[in-house]
Amino acid sequence: MIEVRVQPATRSFLEFIYVRDSLEPQPPPRMLFPLTRCTRAWPISSTCLYIARPCRHQFRSSFRFSTMSRDTSHQSDISKMKSEKDGTFNRLASVFRDFIEPGGKFAPEKGRYHLYVSYACPWATRTLIVRKLKGLEDFIPVTVVSPRMGNDGWPFATADAYPGADADPLFKSAHVRDLYLRADPNYERRFTVPLIWDTVHNTIVNNESSEIIRMFNTAFNELLPEDKAKIDLYPEANKAEIDAVNEWVYPEINNGVYRAGFATTQEAYETAVKIVFGALDKAEKLLTGKDYLVGGQLSEADVRLWVTIIRFDPVYVGHFKCNFTTIRDGYPEINRWMKALYWKNSAFKDSTDFDHIKTHYYWSHPQINGTRIVPYGPIPNIQPL
């Protein structure tokens, strides 16, 4: 505890600014408390040096020390993630589910929203691909986190200066966790990417990738050039077929590889991995002689499947033990489709960073890979056309 004596005068809040630290690696950089009396003991570790000063302004309550100091490791530390009693892994639903839409609380505006992603994360890569396909790069800036997700979750470059990682330009946050607690001090789910931040209401709009890509697909059309506005990844004529493909691709492939990789019993793993390869067999037949999954045109169904397939040989075969075969050796139609999108469409290639992908999985899951050694292969990460 530190005792601070301050004469409030006209100022009603006390701000603590971090200067240096001897033991704690990542203390909160700024903290603010209501100044209710001149003398008060504040719960700050004695190992940290802070400057205290009175101030007139108030940050959002979610950034007060009382929030920052609560234990959130069960939300940020993936090694503490719990499986079901039978050893299966079940992913929790996303919480922030508002929409960007004309006339709504979150209206489409250039520069108003900020996208936070990881190149390693398949769900985040969905949003990067659609953002580029729709020409939204100048409308929605993006910040990339470090792939090394540690005890505090996804770090920004200020906490882990990994090549290709960015600092948080809005709040100088150390971790994605800080954004969630800023938006909701009582948030209890995992601190995930992607997420869309609204700079007007200072909150998270949405952290569900399947909904973010649909927002990107239509919400900004009135502000876009005609050629970008007419791109439709979820056209009315194909919606039913796209939904039908998504309905089995998500649980059996997208999330299926995680159910295999995060299983904690042999039975749970074997059940999950068999489902993955059964679904890959189905996708192979569906893509035979075709360039796209649905309707002879690029759709969100392709985006959603592709982000898993591009990671399959570099990561899921070894790390998640999905090793019946590889995509390149066992699924020629899927491999052809995957390579064509990567090499012929910059939205897919530019949204892919194999170094971030491999480093994240092999470094960030010590419960699976205790040495954190990142494999050198496969060579190449993706074959040429």
Image (cartoon, helix red, strand yellow):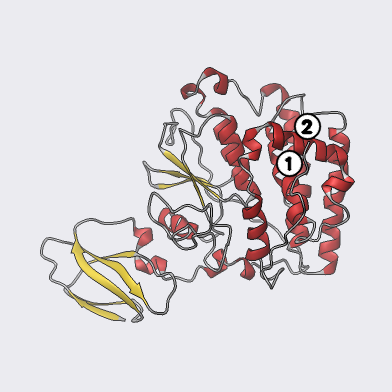
Local secondary structure at mark 2: loop
Please name the residue that numbered disc 1 is placed on: 305
Look at 62% across and 52% down and name the residue there: 120
Task: List x then y, in percent, for residue 359.
Answer: 64, 59
The answer to whether marks 1 and 2 mark residues whose Cβ atoms lie closer than 8 Å is yes
Nearest the viewer among 264 and 328 is 328
Q: Is residue 173 above or below residue 26?
A: above
Look at 81% across and 36% down and name the residue there: 336
Q: Is residue 259 above or below residue 287?
A: below
Task: List x then y, in percent, for residue 92.
Answer: 64, 56
Q: Classify residue 64 as left or right of residue 156.
A: left
Q: Amino acid at mark 2?
A: Leu
Please name the residue that numbered disc 2 is placed on: 293
Q: Amino acid at mark 1?
A: Leu
Local secondary structure at mark 1: helix
Please identify the residue farthest to the top as the structure is shown: 226
